[in-house]
Image: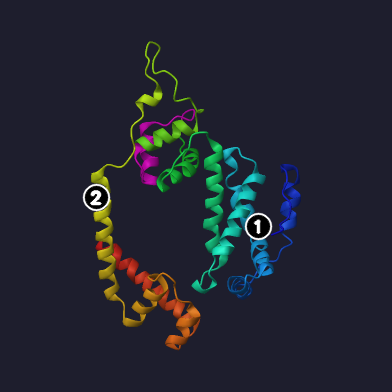
């Protein structure tokens, strides 16, 4: 797929002007192009879907400039994300491509930042990644920060906002705002012990694994109970759209129930809201 060339920081302004030439698609145009690509593998349709979202990619990429990486690389990674999004996009689900693609674009850029920013992998869990990408912003919002250091109060406030432990905030702050160090450095002047000898095994214990399995069983039970609040049509639509390996398209369901695609989408959306509320009340 041929896209405008983005080779260096020097031609960034030219690139941003070039991508403005691609038209923004209406909802109907987007739906028809996505359908053509999904059903017939139409490369031209895919190209139009991608290029119409290059401005969105550039806007998201600009938000990651604070990590000291070339903006051109951030945009290039984001472009990979929008191409992946187009390949996976299902127009029958009733959402616009931009809503779906934002996740793919951010995920691709964030993975690049995480792998490029430090020789040591910053974080592997969703909570650690959230902490990595929000810590700098939250620190800038705190007026009591002194020379980049975190006081216990600062760490507690940030931990509360991001729903992580205070120790994780302090650890991530140290890793973000100090250089990487070798794990083979000796611990103390007169010791043969190295830093790597002090590392704690983070592997989950058996009791934690059992606890997670019990929680999963509990959540499945709650969801099964929540389904009972739906009427027969809502339950069938949710089952065929969300709970089977190959979801049924809106178009097929509209024929089955003799209603419009939009009406099926509305029923599905309303049913999901009812389920969400019921599950929340049960937890």
Q: Which residue is depicted at the point 34% across and 77% down? A: 235
Residue 61 lies, in percent from the top left, at 60, 49
- Which of the colour schemes (rainbow, by chain, secondary structure, one colour) is used? rainbow
Residue 78 vs 255, above or below: the answer is above
Q: Quadrant of the N terminus?
A: bottom right
Magenta stretch contains residue 157: yes
Magenta stretch contains residue 220: no
Residue 268 vs 141, above or below: the answer is below
Residue 116 vs 216, above or below: the answer is above
- Relative placement, left or right, of 99 versus 18 is left
Residue 125 visible at all = yes
- Relative placement, left or right, of 41 versus 190 is right
Q: Which residue is mark 2?
A: 210
Residue 106 vs 168, above or below: the answer is below
Residue 50 lies, in percent from the top left, at 64, 62
**Is residue 259 or residue 82 the one in the foreground?**
82
Q: Which residues are magenta?
A: 146-166
- Relative placement, left or right, of 183 versus 38 is left
Report helix, strand or loop for mark 2.
Answer: helix
Q: Quadrant of the C terminus?
A: bottom left
- What is the total number of numbered labels drawn onto the structure image? 2
- Relative placement, left or right, of 158 versus 207 is right
Q: Which mark is residue 55?
A: 1
The CA distance from mark 1 to mark 2 is: 46 Å
In which image quadrant can residue 33 be found? Answer: bottom right
Residue 265 lies, in percent from the top left, at 46, 76
Q: Which residue is depicted at the point 30% across and 42% down? A: 204
In which image quadrant can residue 253 be found? Answer: bottom left
Report helix, strand or loop for mark 1.
Answer: helix
């Amino acid at each position: 797929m041929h896209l405008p060339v983005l080779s260096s920081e020097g031609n960034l302004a030219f690139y941003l002007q070039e991508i403005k030439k691609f038209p923004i698609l209406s909802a109907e145009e987007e739906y028809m192009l996505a359908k053509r690509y999904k059903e017939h593998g139409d490369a031209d349709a895919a190209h139009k879907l991608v290029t119409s979202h290059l401005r969105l990619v550039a806007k998201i990429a600009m938000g990651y400039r604070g990590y000291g990486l070339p903006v051109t690389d951030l945009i290039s990674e984001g472009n990979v994300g929008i191409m992946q999004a187009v390949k996976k996009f299902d127009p029958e689900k009733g959402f616009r491509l931009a809503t779906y693609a934002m996740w793919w674009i951010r995920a691709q850029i964030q993975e690049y930042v995480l792998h490029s920013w430090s020789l040591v992998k910053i974080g592997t869990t969703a909570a650690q990644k959230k902490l990595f990408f929000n810590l700098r912003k939250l620190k800038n919002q705190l007026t009591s920060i002194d020379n980049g250091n975190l006081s216990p109060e600062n760490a507690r406030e940030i931990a509360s906002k991001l729903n992580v432990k205070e120790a994780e905030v302090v650890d991530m702050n140290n890793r973000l705002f100090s250089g990487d160090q070798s794990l083979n450095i000796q611990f103390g002047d007169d010791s043969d012990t190295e830093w790597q000898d002090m590392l704690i095994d983070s592997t989950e214990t058996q009791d934690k694994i059992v606890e997670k399995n019990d929680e999963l069983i509990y959540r499945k039970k709650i969801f099964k109970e929540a389904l009972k609040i739906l009427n027969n049509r809502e339950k069938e639509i949710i089952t065929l759209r969300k709970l089977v390996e190959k979801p049924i398209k809106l178009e097929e369901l509209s024929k089955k129930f003799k209603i419009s695609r939009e009406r099926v989408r509305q029923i599905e959306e309303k049913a999901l809201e009812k389920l969400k509320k019921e599950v929340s009340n049960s937890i």
